Amino acid sequence: MTAKVVNRRIRLLFVLLALALAGTLARAVWLQGVRAAPLSKLAATQQRQTVELPARRGTIFDRNGVPLALGEQATTVYADPTQVSSPRVVALAAEKTLGLDAESLFPKLLDRSTSFVYLRRKADSTDAEALRQRDLAGVGFYTEERRSYPQGAVGAQVLGFAGADNKGLAGLELQLDDVLSGTPGRETVIRDPFGRVVDVLSETEERQGRDVFLTLDHRIQANTEAVLRSTVRRWGAKSATAVVLDPRTGGLLAMATVPTFDANRFAETKPELQRNRTVSDTYEPGSTFKLIPIAGALSEGLVTPQSAFTLATTIKVADREISEHEPRATVRMTVADIVAQSSNIGAITLAQLLGSRRLASWVDRFGFGAATGIDFPGESQGIVLPLERWSGSTIGNLPIGHGIAVTPVQMAAAYAAVANDGVWLRPHLVDHVVGGARARVERRRILSKDIAAQLSTMLTGVVAEGGTGTAAAIPGYHVAGKTGTAAKPLPDGSGYSTSKYVASFVGFVPASRPRLVILVTVDEPTTIWGGVVAAPAFQELARFALQYLEVPPDDPASAATETP
């Protein structure tokens, strides 16, 4: 090789080195000059991180302080695919400890276009700790709160449920979400290249959710659901509902719908089972609605409990001919007899004395056709035909509970007004929020005390010997109540079913000093009569609650004559 060739190669190498140096210098100038600001910002964001500090969701307690909905500590497990060194190992480890499917997880861990993948949201802390012990690169953990319902199915439709993000989705969890959820805090930290926190730049403390105490009693609620389940099985019914109400306060001790579901497994439950039907669904009340025209006729001074009427076997109203629920001869009945025997013709006769306008006014006065204002989402206002749309036969249908749809809680509140000396109270579920005062309960007088007493006395005749509700009688106590049997409207609106009925009973006890108002509805039982199907359920519910609440008898003589 000649010296000339060597020199040429040296010069070429020098030029290449010079170009490389110039390129490096230009890159440095570009990065430190033109790109300095955005790169500095990127570096800061890689080191600085703002973390949300979740707020504890408030606990829901029953009236005695028993937790019905609370937060439990859980661990969320995630992975950063860009940091996972062995996706196959991580997938198999997650399958073993968290019960995941390794084959479906593996492709997600291979995808390096994302830096975050949930492995298990709100996993059991023990399972998560077993995975943490494997010390796998790219797998991270953080603590979250998981909503739990320790009573399982008890009160599920009332409580509702909260979702994965701890936000209320249904029931009281939704109604009270602003109170229960609190406000999360924030913490800005500096991390080293290994992800460890080296400094805390700022911190905003979280505000925990507030606890709530309900009027519900979990023991009365559980017993109510058990009795309804037994009733549905016994009579081959489609479903059943019940309301247990304290007429002195308007507080609900139980609201039950059967079938029910386990609130801890709400995602696996059909939506129709999640509804609180005592508030959201309506039914034609049948004879339990006879209270309204009778209360109106008494209050307007048109009759007294002793006023007597000769009642034929049928009564013609416009184009309809209406008879009794069971055939009978022409009889003479007092108003008290009309109530005790649940006479259709008697109730219509009293409604005709009132007239359409006054009857419509009394329907409105008892709160039908309007929401009660209960502190629960999705309340139905029922269906009441406006007076201007009444036909000639409405005065015959409405007094016997047809052509009108009510909710169970509306009907329970109406009877509670009679039990409470004529004062209607807004039914409610929330007793108080911790740290706040008890809310003022809306009240209004709808009957005079004397009229309420007269109605109460007549309603005890329903349960006494010879009445339609004798199966509701409780030894040791005077019981006031009313049976109801109503054919269900056909879906196409062409009339009423001849095979599908709603059987019901609503009443209060002790009649002289009412502590409980209880309503039971049974949908599509094989035996249709409210006195046969719903009244025994009322008795079971009342006997348990009276004993549990230690309510003294108001008729001890009847207890002494009870057959062992």
Image: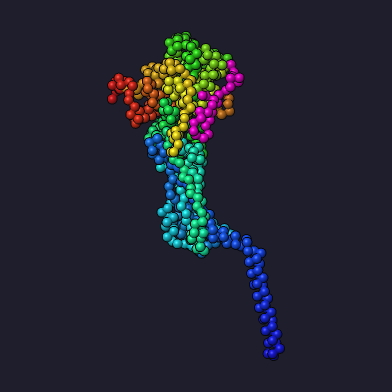
Residue at image location 44% in from the left, 28% down from the top: 250
Which quadrant holds residue 113? Answer: bottom right
Please state the horizontal and vertical placement of residue 542, each as a whole percent of the image.
37, 27
**Which contiguous range is marked in magenta?**
367-392
Give percent across and percent down for residue 8.
Answer: 70, 85
Residue 88 visible:
no
- Residue 452, percent across and down? 43, 18
Above or below, 75 relative to 266: below
Give the prevailing secondary structure in the magenta stretch.
loop
Q: Is residue 131 above or below residue 335?
A: below
Query: Front-most of 152 and 54?
Result: 54
The C terminus - image quarter: top left
The answer to whether residue 36 is left or right of residue 244 is: right
Residue at (48%, 20%) from the top-left corner? 446
Q: In terms of depth relative to the viewer, which is nearer, 284 or 369?
A: 369
Residue 384 part of the magenta segment: yes
